[in-house]
Amino acid sequence: MIPINDRVALDETEFQFEFIRASGPGGQNVNKVSTAVRLRFDVTGSVSLPDDVRQRLIRLAGKKVGADGFLTLHARARRTQEANRREAIDRLVELVQKACERPRSRRQTRPTLASRKRRLETKRHRGEAKARRRSPGSPEE
């Protein structure tokens, strides 16, 4: 179990790892060894996640969650399978930690009396400035 916070812990048996060859530079090693990691985590079917965290995680992950409900992360920056595996798990834990944070609800506020007066005063000044630009015999007056 990987602890996220006091109420959420991820079960490592829910992770699916696939080791693939990484692209990019690396000489002969890159063509021989499958060091890159593809981590798949079933967000919709996970028993480790409460419903509210699950919904936020799906929204946060965006395109990383497929139509099948699996979150897919790729890690290929490191030279060893274990390091890439660790990085993928760390990124998943970080994503779930962000999803565990409840968004603060916005409390509606009202503008102060002084700010309303300032707003009306600047509108009046702007209107007077525009009125001074008009020609003296214009029909808009």
Image (spheres, rainbow, N blue to C red):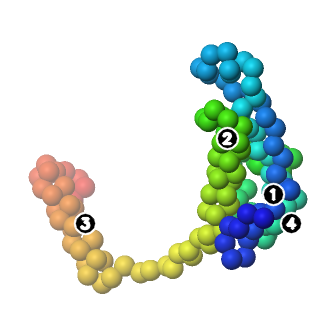
Q: Quadrant of the C terminus?
A: bottom left
Would you say 19 lies left or right of 76 here?
right
Q: Which residue is mark 1?
A: 12
Residue 11 x, y percent position in the rendering: 81, 62
Q: Earlier in the sequence, mark 1 or mark 4?
A: 1
Circle 1: residue type: Glu
Mark 3, mark 4: which one is toward the viewer?
A: 4
Labels 3 and 2: the sequence-earlier one: 2
Residue 134 in view of the camera: yes
- Judge depth for marks 3 and 2 and give the one in front: 2
Q: Which residue is mark 3?
A: 123
Vertical placement of 82 versus 104: above or below? Answer: above
Distance (Cα) linking label 1 and label 4: 12 Å
Q: Is residue 60 visible?
A: no
Quadrant in the picture for residue 96: bottom right
Q: Nearer the viewer, residue 45 or 127?
A: 45
Disc 2 designates what residue?
84
Of labels 4 and 2, earlier in sequence is 4
